[in-house]
Image (tube, rainbow, N blue to C red):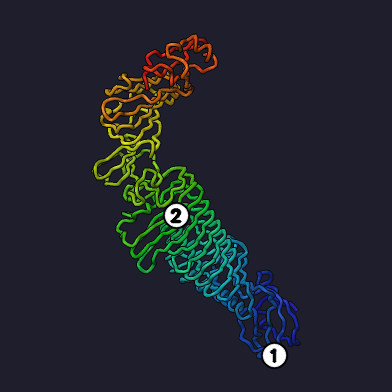
């Protein structure tokens, strides 16, 4: 026998034999998805639950019971799935029937289901499953949420959660005290007082796969803030368009892995490290792989932020490995000074921070906040809390990144400061990249110094020359004279430590020369000229009055050791016989050393043409 609706079935007075079967065509009308098969239990007096146990109005004893197999469809309990209807009771009855009948799966077909009560899985291995992430939509009102509580191995699969504005919803999805939960293909949007998705206490080994927060109008996107957030995995999950908060807020994380996240347009930054008196920050091994992040929707907000309201924050083991970031920056983890306006710094510690293989399309500058790491690609192996960069107001220069201990400075060193050098602002122990002078300075208790090639590679200089007056280490200067000839004066040899070398190289192919001048003569000469591309001059100070020329060669230079010939014997004829000029590029310099002459033991020879050499008869003794 067939019935068109549940109303028709309840009104029927036909006498049925035990186990007789009937077919319901629809809950409200044929084809609405709420129909199914029933059998007649002639002895039952159970209460009508709206879906799986049906009492006929005129029959006191006997109930129709649904044949459900392993799945309960909320439409079989009267859920309509339209935005204009309240499906709270239908969904609650369906969920209760799952528990009573030990049926694991509650199914929500395509539609928009309004509920004012929580939909919470409380049975081990229980499943809440939608038809698709965009097709099955749960509309939350009156503070309702979706999630789990005190269960294990629960699954939340393939649906969307949308909290209505002004309804006081705290979270969209909460996994609470539910270890080993799987959340897959879930999309959360709407208005929340806390966040869209929250991992609650003691929900270890929970895994999120392809889950989204998008258009979170109030609150944050995700929270990992409770004790027991151990071995949490986020795989290909997104935090997008968080209008007033951050993308992911983390306080508690032990062995947490976030793989291939996508973070975009989160107003207060993408990933936030949070601590308060009742929410201690304890991050132990947080790994983020293949990060993709576009700039936050609030100008200059960094990729990573610190929100330390009070209490203790301990970050021990943060690893960010690979990805793309448009607008990369993160907190300076060594002292946390001034991270958030009004925030305290006591009780914060951080160790073992590693950022590597990040490709960026730019970096953020926040002039009002100190303490951020910023920098363009590539940032590699910035270990032990060492990417120490603070961008100061007014700086439009390049960002420099220095590895910790690359110049023997202690791990607790201050940030690398970027901007026009200001000796008043620079504190003892500070590194400062001076964009105006294009050099790196270090200040200690005795003064401030320009650091050389052992600590920083200075980019090719065009126009503005570096100030060499305070160098204390070997210095390498590549010069580009494409626009005009360059003259670079050396400081007095007496102001430079004995044994220190200065190397100057012409890197362009133009005809404009690079001229090095010095009042402290360079092997007797007051100036030396680099005229060909890749020509290089290296001089060494005696610490007193002169510079010794260590080498003066070009890219095609050769050095020969020959103790069997006197310098006077090295002539154009000798050279063309033994070293045919045609076999060497134009401009090649050959230096003969260890000659038999006691008074002059070097000779410099330059190729002038395909058939001729020029012999430097006044080559200095080394």
The image quarter containing residue 313 is bottom left
The correct choice, above or below, for 225 with respect to 99 in the image is above
Crowding at mark 2 (Cα within 10 Å: few <14, some 14-19, many 20+):
many
In the picture, measured across the screen, residue 467 lies left or right of residue 235, that is: left
- The reply to whether residue 255 is in sight is yes
Question: Where is mark 1, residue-wise?
Answer: 43
Q: Name the foreground residue: 338 vs 29.
A: 338
Q: Name the foreground residue: 563 vs 34.
A: 563
Q: Position of residue 294 (x, y in %)?
A: 47, 49
Location of the C terminus (image quadrant)? top left
Q: Name the foreground residue: 549 vs 352.
A: 549
The image quarter containing residue 488 is top left
Pointer 2 or 1: first along the chain: 1
Q: Position of residue 392 (x, y in %)?
A: 32, 44
Residue 511: mark in rendering = none
Question: Where is mark 2, residue-wise?
Answer: 270
The correct choice, above or below, for 136 with respect to 464 in the image is below
The correct choice, above or below, for 326 with respect to 518 in the image is below
Q: Are marks 2 and 1 in contact (CB under 8 Å)?
A: no
The correct choice, above or below, for 492 with respect to 344 in the image is above
Per the image, label 1 sits on a secondary structure element best described as: loop
């Amino acid at each position: 026998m067939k019935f068109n609706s549940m109303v028709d079935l309840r009104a029927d007075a036909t006498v049925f034999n035990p186990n007789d079967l009937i077919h319901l065509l629809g809950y409200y009308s044929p084809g609405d998805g709420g129909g199914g098969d029933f059998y007649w239990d002639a002895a039952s007096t159970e209460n009508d639950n709206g879906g799986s146990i049906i009492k006929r109005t005129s029959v006191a004893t006997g109930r129709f019971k649904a044949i459900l197999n392993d799945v309960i469809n909320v439409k079989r309990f009267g859920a309509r799935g339209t935005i204009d209807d309240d499906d709270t009771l239908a969904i609650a009855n369906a969920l209760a029937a799952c528990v009573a009948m030990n049926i694991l799966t509650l199914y929500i077909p395509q539609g928009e289901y309004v509920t004012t009560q929580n939909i919470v899985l409380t049975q081990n291995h229980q499943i809440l499953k939608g038809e698709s992430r965009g097709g099955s939509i749960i509309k939350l009102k009156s503070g309702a949420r979706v999630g789990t509580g005190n269960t294990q191995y629960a699954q939340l699969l393939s649906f969307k959660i949308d909290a209505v504005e002004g309804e006081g919803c705290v979270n969209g999805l909460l996994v609470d005290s539910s270890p080993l939960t799987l959340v897959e293909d879930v999309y959360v949007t709407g208005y929340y007082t806390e966040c869209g998705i929250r991992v609650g206490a003691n929900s270890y080994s929970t895994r999120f796969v392809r889950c989204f927060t998008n258009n979170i109008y109030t609150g944050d996107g995700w929270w990992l803030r409770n004790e027991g957030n151990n071995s949490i995995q986020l795989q290909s999950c997104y935090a997008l368009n968080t209008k007033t908060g951050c993308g992911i807020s983390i306080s508690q994380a032990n062995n947490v892995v976030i793989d291939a996240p996508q973070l975009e347009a989160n107003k207060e930054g993408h990933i936030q490290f949070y601590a308060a008196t009742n929410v201690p920050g304890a991050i132990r091994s947080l790994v983020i792989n293949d990060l993709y992040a576009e700039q936050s929707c609030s100008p200059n907000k960094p990729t990573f932020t610190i929100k330390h309201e009070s209490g203790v924050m301990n970050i021990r083991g943060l690893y960010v490995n690979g990805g793309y970031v448009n607008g990369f920056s993160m907190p300076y983890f060594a002292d946390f000074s001034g991270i958030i306006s009004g925030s305290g710094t006591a009780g914060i510690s951080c160790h073992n921070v590693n950022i590597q293989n990040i490709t960026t399309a730019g970096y953020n500058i926040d002039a009002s906040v100190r303490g951020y790491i910023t920098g363009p690609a590539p940032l590699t192996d910035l270990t032990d809390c060492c990417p120490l960069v603070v961008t100061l107001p007014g700086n439009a220069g390049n960002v420099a990144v220095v590895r910790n201990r690359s110049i023997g400075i202690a791990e607790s060193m201050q940030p690398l400061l970027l901007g026009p050098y200001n000796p008043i602002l620079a504190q003892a122990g500070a590194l400062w990249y001076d964009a105006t002078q294009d050099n790196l300075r270090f200040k200690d208790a005795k003064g401030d110094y320009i650091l050389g090639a052992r600590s920083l590679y200075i980019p090719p200089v065009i126009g503005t020359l570096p100030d060499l007056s305070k160098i204390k280490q070997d210095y390498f200067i590549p010069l580009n004279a494409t626009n005009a000839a360059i003259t670079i004066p050396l400081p007095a040899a007496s102001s430079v430590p004995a044994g220190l070398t200065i190397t100057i190289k012409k890197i362009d192919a133009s005809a404009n020369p690079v001229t090095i001048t010095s009042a402290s003569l360079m092997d007797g000469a007051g100036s030396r000229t680099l005229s060909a591309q890749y020509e290089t001059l290296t001089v060494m100070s005696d610490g007193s009055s002169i510079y010794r020329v260590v080498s003066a060669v070009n890219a095609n230079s050769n050095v020969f050791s020959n103790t069997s010939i006197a310098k006077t014997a090295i002539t154009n004829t000798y050279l063309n016989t033994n070293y045919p000029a045609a076999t060497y590029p134009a401009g090649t310099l050959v230096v003969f050393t260890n000659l038999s002459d006691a008074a002059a033991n070097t000779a410099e020879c330059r190729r002038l043409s395909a058939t001729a050499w020029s012999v430097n008869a006044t080559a200095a003794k080394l």
